[in-house]
Each structure stands twice: as structure tokens, then as C-alpha cells.
Amino acid sequence: MTRRLNFHWRLRQIMAAHEIWKTTDLIPLLRERGVSLSPAQVYRLVANKPERLSLRTLIALCDIFDCTPANLIEPYAETTAHKMTGDQSAVTLTHGIRPERARVLDDEP
């Protein structure tokens, strides 16, 4: 059995919860916190799951949205089992295992 780690990137959902719809609206907010990214870089950060992310950028995003890294990154593991059957070399079964979901902080009255 093999375990592959992966994650869901939730920046777009958190932006929507804060009524920020355009990726370019993040540029000045990041710049205020010392993170200078081009419009293309910010778009990729929002639209795609980042392969690499600087801690400075992660901290800035947490400050902008008053959240924790757990709100932005939802880790999960994929467990893969291999079975040998007849003339097939292997059949792969994949099961997603997700930890308890992090919640976006709600506005409290």
C-alpha cells in the first residue's frame, strides 16, 4: 500500500468569503505586507495549486484574511493498493482520506 500526500488550495474560496473577486485586488494588499508579486504571479497563486509558496507570502495571506494556514491548505492522503489479477500486472484502487476540514472563520456578532 502506498500513501501519497496532497492538498486542496482554498485561497479562491477564502477570497470569495471576503468578497474579493478579482485577483488584482490582492496585489496592493500583499504589497502593504512586503510581498511584491506581478499580476500574473497573483493570478497563478489564486487560480492554481502552488507547488512552492514562500512563508512570507503565506503569512501575508493569513494576515489579509485573518485566517491560519489550515484555512488555506487542506491536506489529505491518497492510499493506493495494488492487486495482481490474471494477466493484468496491477489494478490500482485509490481511496481519499481527508482529515477534519478546516473552517473559514465566520464573522461573529
Image: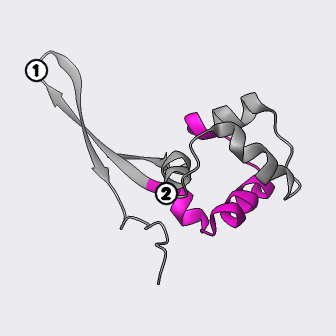
- SS assignment at label 2: helix
Q: Is residue 71 above or below residue 90?
A: below
- SS assignment at label 1: loop
Taking the view exactly as shown, the residue that stands out farthest to the top is: 87
Q: Nearer the viewer, mark 2 or mark 1?
A: 2
Magenta segment boundaries in residue numbering? 46-75
Can you see residue 51?
Answer: no
Q: Is residue 33 left or right of residue 103?
A: right
Observer-nearest of 26 and 44: 26
Name the residue beneath numbered marker 2: 17
Taking the view exactly as shown, the residue that stands out farthest to the bottom is: 109
Q: Residue 86 got which mark?
A: 1
- Crowdedness near tag 2: few (<14), some (14–19) or many (≥20) residues, C-alpha within 10 Å: some
Residue 91: image x %, image y %?
A: 21, 28
Q: In the image, what residue type sits under mark 2? A: Ala
Residue 82: image x %, image y %?
A: 25, 36
